Image (spheres, helix red, strand yellow):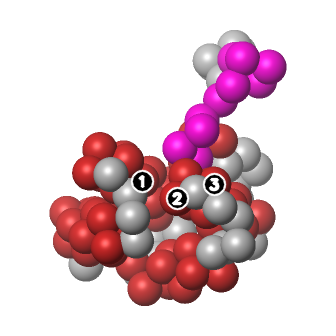
Amino acid sequence: MSDDDLEATLTDAFLDRGAEEAVATAAAERVAAFRDDHEADLAAEGFLDRFAAADTYGSFDHRFDHAIGELAAANEDCTDSRPYRLAGFDELAADPDIGA
């Protein structure tokens, strides 16, 4: 599955699950980026299963961030899930560009 297929599948699924279009697109892009960076065999269904398991976390954004955090925690090569979360880095977070 190409990134375009993954992103299109997830965008549609996220829209069906109540996300606004811009949020659904951004979320799908972040999952594709996670796949590119850490888990080449990640399929849309695999992420959607994690998303479904996070259904008690309230809003779409919170459920998505929880699901991507769980995915990152299960991957030994990913030490920081914030670049893939919709919430991203907050004002209290270290600047990810320091030392780069």
Q: CA distance from mark 3 to mark 1?
A: 11 Å
Q: Which residues are magenta?
A: 85-95
Asked whether the beta carbons under mark 2 and mark 1 sit within 8 Å of each other, the answer is: yes
Which of disc 1 and disc 3 is earlier in sequence? Answer: 1
Above or below 24: residue 43:
below
Viewed as shown, does residue 33 lie left or right of 93?
left
Asked whether the beta carbons under mark 3 and mark 1 sit within 8 Å of each other, the answer is: no
Dot 2 crowding, Cα within 10 Å, few <14, some 14–19, many 20+:
many
**Position in image of residue 80 (x %, y %):** 72, 46
Judge whether residue 92 is colored magenta.
Answer: yes
Which of disc 1 and disc 2 is earlier in sequence? Answer: 1
Q: Residue at x 65, y 29 (%)?
A: 89
- The type of residue carrying mark 3 is His
Name the residue tied to disc 3: 62
Q: CA distance from mark 3 to mark 2?
A: 6 Å
Instruction: Pick whichever, 67 or 97, lies toward us.
Output: 67
Instruction: Pick whichever, 89 or 34, lies toward us.
Output: 89
Q: Residue at x 57, y 81 (%)?
A: 52
Q: CA distance from mark 2 to mark 1?
A: 10 Å
Q: Residue at x 39, y 64 (%)?
A: 18
Would you say residue 33 is visible in this rendering? Answer: no
Above or below 64: residue 95:
above
**Position in image of residue 37 (x %, y %):** 50, 54
Viewed as shown, does residue 31 lie left or right of 85?
left
Name the residue tied to disc 2: 60
Q: Residue at x 55, y 52 (%)?
A: 61
At mark 1, the secondary structure is helix
- The type of residue carrying mark 1 is Ala
Asked whether the beta carbons under mark 3 and mark 2 sit within 8 Å of each other, the answer is: yes
Name the residue tied to disc 1: 27
**Position in image of residue 63 (x %, y %):** 61, 62
**Position in image of residue 46 (x %, y %):** 50, 84
